[in-house]
Image (cartoon, grey):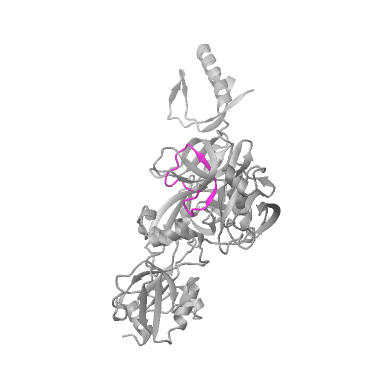
Amino acid sequence: MASLLIFVDLPPPTEFGGVVLDKVDVRRISIFKFLGRINVKFKARLFVIFIFLSWVCPPVAFANSVKDAVVKIFVTSNRMDFYRPWQSLGSSGKTGSGCIISGNRILTNAHVVSDSTFIQVRKESDPKRYTAHLQAVGHDCDLALLTVDDPKFFEGISPLEMGELPNLQDSVSVIGYPEGGDKISITEGVVSRIEIIGYSQSSRKLIAVQIDAAINPGNSGGPGIKDGKLIGIAMQGISESQNIGYMIPTPVIKHFFNDLQDSHYEGFPIIGIDITDTENPALREFYKIQDKIGGVLVTKIIPYSSSDGILKEDDVILEIDDIPLGMDGTFEFRGNERLYLSHLINEKQMGGDVKIKIIRDGQEKITHVKLKSFAPLVPLPNYFSKPSYYIYGGLVFTVLSSDLLSTWGGRWWEKGPLDFLYYLIGTGRLNNQSRQELVVLLQVLPDDINVGYHDISNEVIAKVDGQEIKSFKDFVLILNNNKSKKYTIIETEHNLRIILENTDIEKITAGILKRNNIPFQYSDDVAEWLGVSYPKSLAPEEVK
């Protein structure tokens, strides 16, 4: 006997085709028994409708179990102020979505729980909020795992199973708790594109699934569902466009889980090269690859990266792990689909080996690159949990980072200092001077010791007492070790010289901190470099 599984919630009583039905929740009704209560003419119409729906509509029996596994996340956060690095911006609240997976864990976005000080989660079927804890976070792939200590939270819940990367034109349901209401929301969309894009949380370029379902604030962290399985996590949208949303697909999620097998997250590797295409016939002839198919030209090796000392400028990369590359740097992914070569690197873990076939000086050869942890000269967003800083004679120094640039607000890439942006998006990012970090002077806290320098701000530091600066640690140690000299000479990249007298500079600095209500002279990492057990406070006994 054929049967129909109905998921409806009709207000009682309801008239349907001349028959009064009671309120239905979820119950199995025999089609023929149901049709027996209806006149023959309507019966025929209804039977045709049932047959049509069973053919065009996907099964919905999983709906309730999937909905039960989707949770609303309540977060209290307190982000650090990267321009005034001794303080935070203050507490604020936000909400997001997440889904319960195996092992009594909740998968969500990193940006939902970033800078969190307190997290709660709530199921659709239970009004109680449960306290959650951050178990792991990967800002580069915008994923995070939460746990809940109370086992009652997971009672009666079937965790979501992991699916595979969807195909183009596949139908996907996105479930979550977007702004505009407190109840769970389900939207339908179609996979319209699969490509490498920049993740807004980190600016890392990873594979993503584009769908035509709206992903609004609050949807972030919610699951994308196909055939009852998790095939992605809602991540971001394009505010200027309608119904363009992006999901983090299962290859990225699985990489995240595999990375955490040793309970330590290292992130997605970066090979550290700049490349250009080889479409021009004269270029291909010049590099002796006119008889080859595809290939990309290496134009720059980034210092300290995995490729440094292995690959060379003017190498032509033909294959990565025996996979041929096109002239445009793409490779055959699935059938007629193509992805950019960075995906081949992103699939690997830190410490992994990359086999590369190259043409060097006209000769074909095989080389191997071992992937290691690496940060660009200007670290990507959320690289630091707390900014490093050092205050000396009222001068506030820190490390240039994307997070610092974001303090210039919306469209900071247009508003930020040009000297800073040069190293992030200009040719300065190529790091021709082989520096590990950029030290910047943010501002000057006025005092007699720094008279004449009060208007100086946002300068990149080049030297201290004639010594070139390669990292923030170098800068701090050189500055600290030279206090015995009569003067400290700090030079910026614009050849500006700041000369400070070192006599009683520690006492003077402590007084400046006290007047400006700054609790510590430097950050925790600087304290470790200087060999002290805690940062220097603002109120030493000799300061009155």
Q: Position of residue 59 (x, y in %)?
A: 58, 31
In the displayed structure image, the side of residue 430 where residue 504 appears, left or right: left
Q: Quadrant of residue 508?
A: bottom left
**Figure check: 172 above or below 150:** above
Q: Quadrant of residue 50?
A: top right
* Residue 189 in view here: yes
The secondary structure making up most of the magenta span is loop
In the displayed structure image, the side of residue 326 where residue 418 appears, left or right: left
**Figure check: 159 above or below 381:** above
Q: Position of residue 483 (x, y in %)?
A: 43, 84
In the displayed structure image, the side of residue 454 where residue 466 appears, left or right: right
* Residue 118 in view here: no
Q: Position of residue 272 (x, y in %)?
A: 57, 57
Between 174 and 238, the one nearer to me in the picture:
238
Between 52 and 204, the one nearer to me in the picture:
204
Give me the residue at 46% from left, 51% from top: 200
Give me the residue at 33% from left, 85% from top: 543
Q: What stretch of residues is rendered in magenta?
A: 198-220
**Does 111 appear in magenta?**
no
